[in-house]
Image (tube, rainbow, N blue to C red):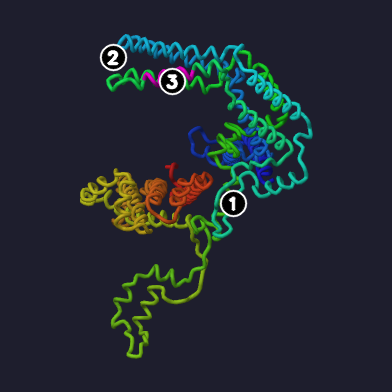
Amino acid sequence: MLVQIITISIFIAIIGCILYGRKLIQTEKVDAVFGNPERAKGGTHWVVVGSAAIILVWLYYSWDIAKGFYPKSANELCQVAKVNESLMGLKYQFPIEEREFKSTSIIKIENKNLEKISNEIKNSIELNDQQKNILIGFINKTNLLIPLLTNQNLIETNTKIKISEMTEEIKLLSSNFGKKDYPFESKEEKLVRQKEIKKQGGWGITKIDAGTGTIEDTIEVPVVPETRRGLKFHAAAKELEIISDKFFKLRNHNPQFKSSIKQLKDEIKNYRKNLNDSEEIASDYAKNIVKIARRIEFASIYPPNALDGMQNAIIEFDDLQKSEQGGLRLIDILLFPAGTIVASGPSCSEQGSGRWLPKPSDTLNKFILMSKPSVGYKNIPLLWIDMMDVSQIIGFILPDWIADFLPGEYPVHTKDGVVKQNFKGQVLKVVTGDFKLFKIPVPYGHIWDSFLRVFLGLVFGILIGVPLGLFMGLNRFAKGFFDPLIELYRPVPPLAWAPLIISVLGIDNTGKVFLLFMVSLSIMIISARAGASGTQLSKIHAAHSLGASKRQILRYVIFPNSLPEILTGIRVAVGMCWGTLVAAEFLAGTTGIGFVENVAKKYFQYEVIWITIFIMGMLGLLFDITLRKIIDKTIPWRGKG
């Protein structure tokens, strides 16, 4: 129901926004000339159209619209796929979907193979004339096997009866399949099927382990027929499977053929047995000839018109089953783009875009489950709130060496085994967070860990990189001294540093934050240096003429002029930090978005992979929107000078 409401709302939003946009174009007075950035401002309705179009494409190609409007369509298509799979082997024998009979195709291939070996034997310089004559004789006898199978007069009566019986079975199936009450299902069978339906769940249902509370698996397509139409195709598939097994077990082996092939095998076996080691080439040719004879023996080769009745019966049933699908065929064509539901043995699966592109409803459901502490991902939720004592935050912020600088000694236990605290000991408890105050809600989880790592790495990079970049842009010594160092490590990809930094600083937050600091540092230094060195000389001279000091020039002229470059550098650094963080969490880590994606990749959990991609995109967008707001507030003059 939710998917239906969302889909209809998206259509209404797209149409409404397009109509509003066209009306606005006709009524709005635009005074700005072409090229003026003011012309690009506003247009929220087009943002809605673009976002809605993306969601609509996702809903459509993930088959979530099909799931929302026709939730049992996948189950019905599964039963149809079972019929098609059972029919495939039979249809493959006839020129129904192929260009020619399977028998004809096999005969052409084996005749070509025999001709190829015959030419090789005749042109061989390693074989003597006697060997050539014997091997050519084997080829001729193998060639004579095929007419023994294709001769209508040689086919056995028992084989004809079995073909006739299978043909009648297919005709009877067609007759029953067209009836409304096919197949007849007793009350007991119906109850058993309903229990199985309840047990298997629905299309795309996520299973949760009752003991651990972790996500086990997602049912791709339920296989037990849930509708009357599905039950009809399910029953027909079972009957067709039995007929197909009978057909492929049947061999058109008449007495003449059996005698001829046995004689040929015995002759080749005796011939190879009497060859010595120096005649290995002749032995290989004889071996290849008997392989062809065996392929002819086990192939389903029949006289040209022996299977005409069965072919017509199969075509009749195939047309009937397509007709019985009714509106399901239209649903398959319209709502299952770039693929369909396919069957493989007793199971069914999505084949196409719906397989690798998770449905928004399933993705949202799994995201909610992974966000709960009771489920989570590897026992850690994506994002949740935990009550933390303020003392732990104080202990994290305050350095422990504060207590070391105080005069006096730390408390020592008495002879009675009692430790009496003194002032220095109390201070140590405060700076280490070893006390109780009050609790406040703080976020935790995979998303928070990744967010905090990026934020800290970016902040440290800004705090050190911006002053150093300004210094390098204003001072000859600083530029000459630091430039080689920065340019030496800047071109090296961050992933090249990751193994070294993680092995030295460990797999915890320290190594990852330091790696992100290195990534953002070089970007911020270059951005700040470019901003400082790009300050207009006329502005600096004007400030000097007004009596400004060096500090005032730096604060009111150079720094404001560098802000556009610095803020642009921060936007670039955010993207680089996210990409580096995910790769670092791939390499080593027990929490974070990259860790989640790495584990999901190993188990082919496509929904989880898409969730991590979506989260990274949303967090990156959140950072970027924040920076846009900062840019609009801090440098409103940009583009208006």
Up/down of 531 relative to 28, above or below: below
First-in-chain label (3 vs 1): 1
- Which residues are drawn in magenta? 261-271
Which residue shows up at 33% across the image and 84% down it?
A: 411
- Residue ID for mark 3: 266
Question: Residue 180: which disc?
Answer: none
Per the model, the C-alpha gap separating discs 2 and 1 is: 67 Å
First-in-chain label (2 vs 1): 2
Horizontal arrangement in the rendering, residue 84 relative to residue 552 (left or right): right
In the image, 166 versus 557, the foreground residue is 166
Q: Amino acid at mark 2?
A: Glu
Horizontal arrangement in the rendering, residue 37 relative to residue 483 (left or right): right
Which residue shows up at 38% across the image and 18% down it?
A: 286
Q: Is residue 206 visible?
A: yes
Q: Position of residue 107 (x, y in %)?
A: 51, 15
Question: Residue 207: which disc?
Answer: 1
